[in-house]
Image (cartoon, rainbow, N blue to C red):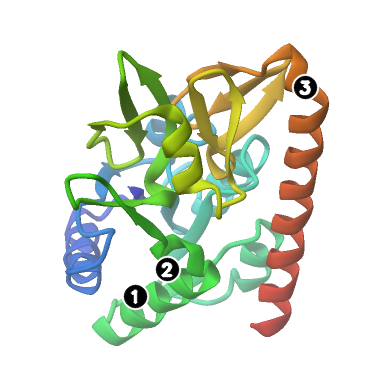
Amino acid sequence: MRLAFVDDDYGEIKKLTTMIDKELQGTVYSSCTKQLFSTGETFLSVWKPGMYDIVFLDIFMDQLTGVDVARQIRKTDASVKIIFCTTSNEFASESYCVDASFYLVKPFSQNMVHTMVQKLIKVDSRLSLFITLPNDRKLYLRDIIYGEYINHKIFIHTKSRNDISFRMSFGNFLELISPFSFLISCCKGIIVNLYEVINKENNCFILSDNSTIPISRRKIKEINNVYADFIFEKMKDKMLNDEAN
């Protein structure tokens, strides 16, 4: 999991990251990556869609506020989770407009951070799904960006940047992941995680790590249908979760 923190108070960021580390200890996310930014301008200068899973934004910053930054994010990325950090809840309506996932009020407390983490994990129970590889290692499926079959080995490129390789036929690997509809083979020797697709153009998937994966010509109709169904189910899940909260 990739986290970005945008706050001009370094001390507050460090407190928050320490609390988050405590909550994630012993979970699949314990090795998540974190990047810290002191201004919204600095963050937006490097920002790309799919770059982070969660962005923490301080609302009260010089020049660009957290709400300003969130609006810029939402112009290109509808999936990244946004969490506002502030000393006041007066911007609650603005947080709703940019589909913020949570509202952390300063000073941070461990109980508040615990509630936030539990809510984020509950949003998608599929985050804990895994398969067991031939070496008995667990591979968490939502950590996969894409996989490829090269020289009798499977190479898995992950969000945690701990890429994995193991010896297995591509057919056996497809059978292993067959229960999970968000992992699909769009061309020979390659599988992609549909959760990591940020765009589809010119019969290619653009992934969160900026990789471009072609869609086989003979599979275009099938893949288009699968992807459309995936987007629909994702939207439906989000609506149900919003109603539950």
Q: Position of residue 54 (x, y in %)?
A: 43, 53
Badge number at residue 86: 2
Would residue 177 be visible to someone looking at this image?
yes
Of circles 2 and 3, the one toward us is 3
Residue position for label 1: 106
Comes first in the chain, label 3 or label 1: 1
Of circles 3 and 1, the one toward us is 3
Which amino acid type is marked by label 3?
Answer: Ile
Residue position for label 3: 220
Comes first in the chain, label 2 or label 3: 2
- Which SS class for mark 1? loop
Would residue 51 be visible to someone looking at this image?
no
The quadrant of the image that shows the C terminus is bottom right
Identify which residue, 183 or 175, lies in the foreground.
175
- Which SS class for mark 3? helix
Q: Residue at x 61, y 64 (%)?
A: 95
Q: Position of residue 140 (x, y in %)?
A: 35, 53
Identify which residue, 2 or 74, lies in the foreground.
2
Mark 1 touching mark 2, by CB under 8 A?
A: yes
